Image: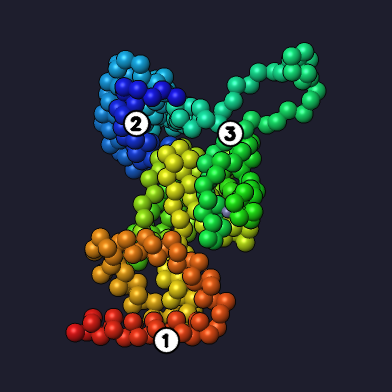
Amino acid sequence: MNVGPGTVALERVRASASALFARIPEPPVYRRAEDPSRKAAQALLPDVERVLAEALAVAREPAVSPLVDRLIEALRAHGEALVHTADGRLEAAELAWRRAQDLERSAHPTRQMVAQPSRPPPVFDKATGQSRFDPRPAPQASVKLVCPNTGCKRMGDYAFIASHAYHRFICPACRTPFLAYFGELRGLEVEVRSSSKRYRFTVDEVGTAATTRIDFEEASGQDFPAARRDLLAFLYTEQRELKVVVNLTNGKLMWVSPAASCFVATAAFGAGAPELVAFRAYRDEVLRKSRLGRGFIRGYYRFGPSVADWVVRRPRVRAGVRWALVRVHHRLTRSERA
Ligand SMILES: [Zn+2]
């Protein structure tokens, strides 16, 4: 892919376009009097014009990636769909919107990574000895994933077949299997709660393009940068426990800390125990406010789950941890009252 002048500007316009696309709703399915979607479509048009102007400026730079041209086409198609929606021409809006979706996909850099040129194999190739009747491997891409198994976390390259959403891999380091589910991001809602974030991913499954929802509550409060059409991998242990979400388009990943946020405390007291509330409050009101505290939280979420697994399996340790945490809890609640 093109790496050179213009790449930073291209990334910037790609980000603005992606943020804009995420705000563009599907055209309404049927006509209604006083449809609010007409006004909403009208209101989005200045933003489409602004991002389109940005993209056109990038396209004038020398040696810029051809992706920008597809982005421009996608923006124009979305603009057209919005004009039709605003004027109440729903069939035309639907057609333009569908075209915009296809263009949006083809403008996406991940497409380049996964798509393979489809050329028929020769009937018989003397040089390689291959014949068309040989079983040929499906188009394949190599993706960087992290082993989600507790205590391993090894990064590795895995072969991903673009026609299948579910893959089962075996980590070469710990020799433990894990599951990966691949999909293109269609929508992401993040609801910030007092001690966690609720993530609602809507993804188009790779291969089938069926739409699925993946919801979970995440306790570490980390950020997960993602744009529409990014290729995501959801990594599970063999016990179907979601551990990691990887954004293969930008290389960012998020470790999923269970909603019962204090692993060690949850392991000691049991989920939903009232003591947990005080620990969560302490994390949010005291620890998160200092740099040292934030470092502690990161380390805790990294190693806490392994410690918690270990605690759960040992009743006497569990009792000991509980005893220690009760004392911490007393101190926390006393300092709150003071
Ligand atoms: Zn491993």
Which amino acid, mark 1?
Trp
Lower position in the chain sequence, tag 2 or tag 3 = 2
Observer-nearest residue: 306 or 205? 306
Q: Which amino acid type is marked by label 3?
A: Ala
- Quarter holding the C terminus is bottom left
State yes or no: Cβ of the residue under disc 3 lies below 8 Å from any atom of ligand 1: no
Horizontal placement of 164 versus 13: left or right?
right
Tag 1 residue: 323
Residue position for label 3:
141
**Percent of width and height locating residue 134:** 79, 25
On the image, the x and y values in percent for residue 63 come to: 35, 16
**Gap in angstroms between the C-alphas marked 1 and 2:** 52 Å
Question: Tag count in the figure?
Answer: 3
On the rendered structure, is 188 left or right of 334? Answer: right
Q: Earlier in the sequence, mark 1 or mark 2?
A: 2
Crowd rating for badge 1 (residues with CA inside 10 Å; few <14, some 14–19, many 20+): few
